[in-house]
Image (spheres, rainbow, N blue to C red):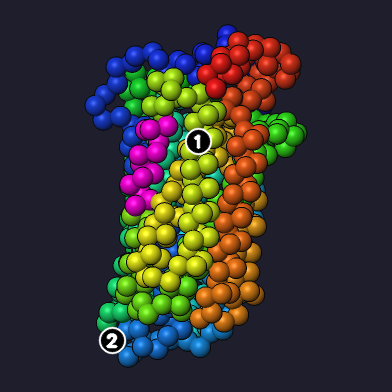
Amino acid sequence: MCTIRVNYSSIEKMEAISDKKVSVPWIKIRYVQMVLLFFLLGMSYAIRTILSVAIVAMVTTDTSINSDIPTFDWKNTGVILSAFYWSYALLQFFAGPIAHTFSPKWILTIAMVVNSGTSLLIPILAVHLGSGGVIACRVIQGIAQGFIIPLVHTMLGRWAPTEERSWINTTVYSGCSFGTIISMPITGYISASWLGWPFSFYLFGILGMVWCVFWIIFSADRPATHKSISLEERRYIEESLGQAEEENIQNEKVPWRAILTSLPYWAVVVGAIGESWGSTFLITEIPTYLSKTTDINIEKNGLYSSAPYVVAAVLTVIYGPLADYLIHSNVTSRKTSRRIFHGLGAFLPALALVWLAYEKNRWGIAALLIVAISLNGAMFCGYNVNHIDISPRFSGVLFGISNGIGQTLAILAPLLVQFIVYDETDKDLWRTMFVIAAIIYAATAVVFITYLSAERQWWDAISRPSKGDFQSELQSHRDQELINQ
């Protein structure tokens, strides 16, 4: 192992270097990476959420105008919907360390090929193997997608300069909403058409394969290995993130003990638990809730389910630049900004879910879903980007652990629905689930807001000085943070 020491003069060298003006080309390679990662999350979430709408058509005989489309008498839909998250949650713990050792570019390529390929297989295996075949495909998709978000975070830690961190992060993650936006209504429309529900799996499986081609051609693991990046842009990114001295480090040891005993990091983990539970519950169960408790048909179901994600995609793109503006204009400190946006993304959706539990009007339900889902995106400027705040170099490892824990607990959401909502037409039973989700949103947000830190942690340094030495070096920065709060 090659170890290289870095001389930190102050935190300003690492975080405020972005004030330096550097001339870069009109087409910036970091933005190309941003667009590619946006569509990666878009396609992965599209493939992930197809089943949430398609399952309604798969177990209902009168959804498609084509009588030849197969339907099934399955009673284990909760298990089918949760199967993805079994393996997805487990892989989070391994994806981060793997990304830190091997090439994120090629791991993501393989992951998306597998993810898309299993989407193409689901209709075939559903007919020949029944629900077991679908469950097997979803477990494999969970394995493949388990690598995606931790590796996206690793890529962001290498490509997003400090002063652009919030908006690049939120732009990339708005791809999650984009994927849901296109997947749910298109799946609903296709399921009601002559093509039937199988075609939706074929369509998005093919689109995922197309993305892989563009990714192989235009992506790179880091600025130093991209063939088309200008020297100016490479220097700008590397100096902003302190990467210039890291280029030759291979198989670097992850400071596990320091990470797992870091209170600011555990605050991030708790924030991830709240977001994972809420988003998983909304994505997997809202189509069923609308289908069983309202008179909305399959075609409109997809539209109603996806409409909140349209608003979410727009707002998520706004959250990032706004957060960066507040920080760099000294309106708020970075820490205060993280608190504001995470609170916005947790407390208001919690209130909307409680209200939704008692709302009877169709349009009122649609409005509350928009509030709950669209404002949830503000948390990308809270706990999500905070991984990179405290450790830009190990952000993929950190995100893998936090998302793994969050998704492990989120597996319980569809299973708990199957246990509590034993009669899917009973709104009182659904009300219990909405209140549980609201409580989890609010409680986890309180913990994150109380204990978060927006400073780069001492164990993220390449030379890894002692905690005392590093904190002494950053004391003036800390004092300024307190003043700004």
Is residue 429 on the magenta stretch?
Answer: no
Mark 2 or 1, nearer chain start: 2
Q: Amino acid at mark 2?
A: Ile
Look at 61% across and 17% down and name the residue there.
478
Residues 337 and 129: in front is 337
CB within 8 Å, label 2 to label 1: no
Residue that lies at the very extreme toward the left in this rendered image: 26
Disc 1 is placed on an element classified as helix
Question: Magenta segment: does it hold 315?
Answer: yes
Q: Position of residue 344 (x, y in %)?
A: 48, 43
In this view, the residue in front, 343 or 241, is: 343
> Residue 452, image x and y in percent?
62, 33
Residue depicted at 42% across the width and 85% down the height: 60
Mark 1 is on which residue type? Ile
Please give the label number shown on residue 65.
Answer: 2
Q: Is residue 10 above or below residue 93?
A: above
Would residue 202 be visible to someone looking at this image? no
Considering only vertical position in the picture, is 460 above or below 36? Answer: above
Is the residue 425 above or below the residue 283 in the image? Answer: below
SS assignment at label 2? loop
Q: Is residue 462 above or below residue 391?
A: above
Q: Is residue 406 visible?
A: yes
Quadrant of the snapshot with the C terminus: top right
Magenta range is 311-323
Q: Which residue is mark 1?
A: 340
The overriding secondary structure of the stretch rendered in magenta is: helix
Number of numbered discs overlaid on the protein picture: 2
Residue sitting at the far bottom: 67
